[in-house]
Amino acid sequence: MAEQIDEVTIRAAGPDDAAAIAAVHVRSWQEAYEGIVPEVYLAGLDPEQRAREWADHLRTGPQDQVTTWVAESGDQVIGFLSFGPSRDEDAQRGDREIYSIYLDPGTWGHGVARDLMRTMLGELGAHTRVSLWVLADNERARHFYRRHGFQPDGVERIDEVGGAELLEVRYRRG
């Protein structure tokens, strides 16, 4: 991905976006989680398998509850955000959760994640409580979420990824 980014468009994702979303998803994981998630796991991420999962999700998922947006520059998907009802045990009716937000690493620092986040927050409105889970060691993401009004709420969990037990921290806004 070139460092220069032309105009970015945010739009609803569809099944035809699955391969592009998967490619961004895998590249982002491999870059963002280097040194956090086991190297062998990151090296084994398969964009084709991930594309099949995304295609199935975008084709048959609960579209009335889960929303996925893509960020495009020209005709290339450079990022995505997916959110829906909160899956946390202590969630209240109407609470939402960001399930994923990933960008092509070549676009980091260009405002694309900000545009995706603002689009989602604008749709939900100021009074909707939104949560997300972030790896404790992913300081870049934690800083981004704090800049957008999210704060850790004291809830943590251990998630097993690639054979490693990793600490995740819940952030909330609203």
Image (cartoon, helix red, strand yellow):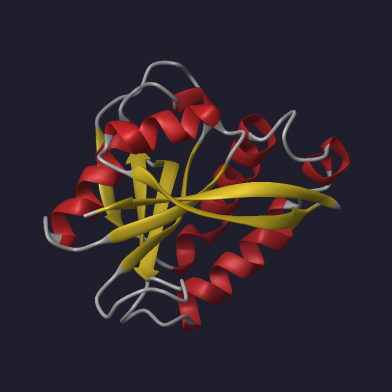
State how many labels appear.
0
Residue 67 visible (yes or no): no
Q: Nearer the viewer, residue 123 or 149?
A: 149
Quadrant where the C terminus sits is bottom left
Depicted 33 relative to depicted 110: above or below: below
Point out the residue furthest to the left here: 126
Depicted 59 relative to depicted 146: above or below: below
Instruction: Give the residue at x 63% y 38%.
Output: 27
Point out the residue furthest to the top here: 3
On the picture, is 16 further left or further right than 131? right
Q: Position of residue 7 (x, y in %)?
A: 24, 30
Q: Position of residue 107 (x, y in %)?
A: 44, 26
Instruction: Give the residue at x 19% y 63%.
Output: 128
On the picture, is 135 further left or further right than 74? right
Q: Nearer the viewer, residue 84 or 52?
A: 84
On the picture, is 45 further left or further right than 146? right
Instruction: Give the residue at x 39% y 71%.
Output: 86
Depicted 89 relative to depicted 10: above or below: below
Depicted 165 relative to depicted 129: above or below: above
Residue 128 visible (yes or no): yes
Instruction: Give the residue at x 47% y 68%.
Output: 15
Q: Position of residue 66 (x, y in %)?
A: 37, 72
Q: Position of residue 53 (x, y in %)?
A: 63, 69
